Image: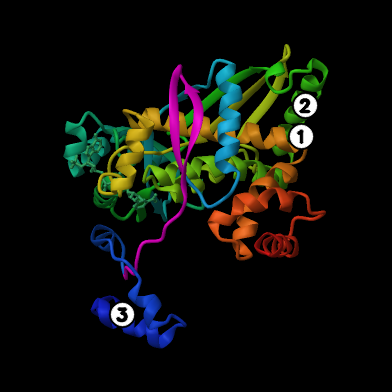
Amino acid sequence: MVDGYHKMSRSAQLEWLRDHTQLTTDELDQFGVDYIHQQMIENYLTDFSLPEGIAVNFKVNQKEYAVPMVTEEPSVIAAASNGAKIVNLAGGFQSESQLLKMGQVLVSEIVDPEQLTAELNQVADQILEIANNAHPSIVKRGGGARSIRVRNLGHQCLSIDVFVDTQEAMGANIINTMMESVGNWIQEQFSGRLEVDLKILSNLADCALTTVKCDIPIQLINSDLERARDLAKRIAKASYFAQIDSYRAATHNKGILNGIDAVAIATGNDWRAIQSGAHAFAAQSGMYKGLSTWKVVDDKLCGVLKIPLPVASVGGSITINKQVQQNFKILKVNTAKELAEVIGSVGLAQNLAALKALAGEGIQQGHMKLQAKSLLIANGAMPEEVDSMLSLLFNQPKMNAQAAQKVIEEVRN
Ligand code: NDP
């Protein structure tokens, strides 16, 4: 236990770490400080870096994109680029998105839910006004609270859902501020007939849904027509399994989110919000399912991805993080809506590449090629030695730590 760590000076915090962890004084001395990041989180120690790469060949709604991706996982960027190239040759992705967000006021201890629902609907305009008055600047920007919905949750509980246009912002703070005011007003107006319990954004952002489609002539996945037909059928089957088995769906969706998270991080967006929304949406039917489907129609492989993407081009860390700003320059997106459409396309490209590998040569063969570099580094190879060691490692009967160590020794001697 430590009391008041957050109140200690930086040197006292470093001293505490030296005394209570295995860090040495030398290691502690090497921690750099970014003074802007130091203001962003609590108990700041240092910056933590992750690799950033560029996925290429994306064509979305007829516009070409180079996409910055931040990920520690080998093969993610290669797979995204590979999937994007195939779709590019087929004319590109068609992507569309809506960007409303939802806040909720959760109330309990209701005696007559039907009567209260009717009364709440009657004061819908007042609820919208209260919400908008709580954050007038978003109204000035052309956004604001748009509509309400009252849902009976059973157990004498209701949710008053408020749909808000937060323009270019993700809107969590905007909506939380609005819901505070709406909740307080409802408590006052309906005093004695309900208890207002929670006033907060919902991360199940199904009103910020992005839909991405692509139709790929199957000869783009294999030039031999018969092999292409077989591969396309297997891809469609793999996607079908994600509709009927949640165990498979979880892995299917993880592949989609491999790409989506990487762009979300690169653009300073809240990837935890995207993750929770995606998984809740995947389970909305009562069963957890794959977020994308693939079908073969007239020798075309047709993919569709539907996913909530409550992303932003301003707010949070976006405006203050220099690298995020540079990534927006790489992406050349003008709005949060366009960003969502590109991010959704990255998810579908990632999914295509994963299913193509899984249905074809198997995921491991391609994966291990890309894991080889990490394997060599993890076993002591210097980055400048890796290229000269790769082919030797591929020739080993098994690609594991022992094989990597053997190759490193061989090359060095
Ligand atoms: P901010 O609190 O940073 O608010 C964004 C602000 O940007 C707006 O209030 C607005 O202020 C300003 N702005 C400037 N230009 C525009 C524009 N064109 N459109 C809209 N706003 C503009 O962020 P959010 O409210 O978006 O909240 C997102 C943050 O909240 C993220 O960091 C997220 O991680 C975090 N969060 C997430 C939660 C969740 O997901 N459950 C919960 C709580 C926080 P003005 O108009 O006054 O200039």
List x then y, in percent, for residue 308: 48, 36
Magenta residue span: 43-69
Q: Quadrant of the C terminus?
A: bottom right
Q: Which residue is mark 2?
A: 231
How are the residues colored?
rainbow
Task: Pinpoint residue 43: horizontal percent, then vertical percent.
Answer: 32, 71
Residue at disc 1, CB closer than 8 Å to ligand 1: no
Label 3 element class: helix
- Mark 2 residue crowding within 10 angstroms, few (<14) / some (14–19) / many (20+): many
Of the residues under marks 1 and 2, which one precedes in the sequence?
2
Which secondary structure, mark 1?
helix
Residue bearing mark 1: 359
Q: Position of residue 339 (x, y in %)?
A: 39, 32
- Picture coordinates of residue 10 (x, y %)? 26, 76
Direction from residue 106 to residue 279 in the image, left or right: right
**What amino acid is found at the position of numbered circle 1 in the picture?**
Ala
- State which quadrant residue 285 falls in: top right
Residue marked by disc 3 = 13
**Which residue is depicted at the point 77% across and 21% down?**
228
> In the rendered structure, which disc, 3 or 2, sits on the residue that comes first in sequence?
3
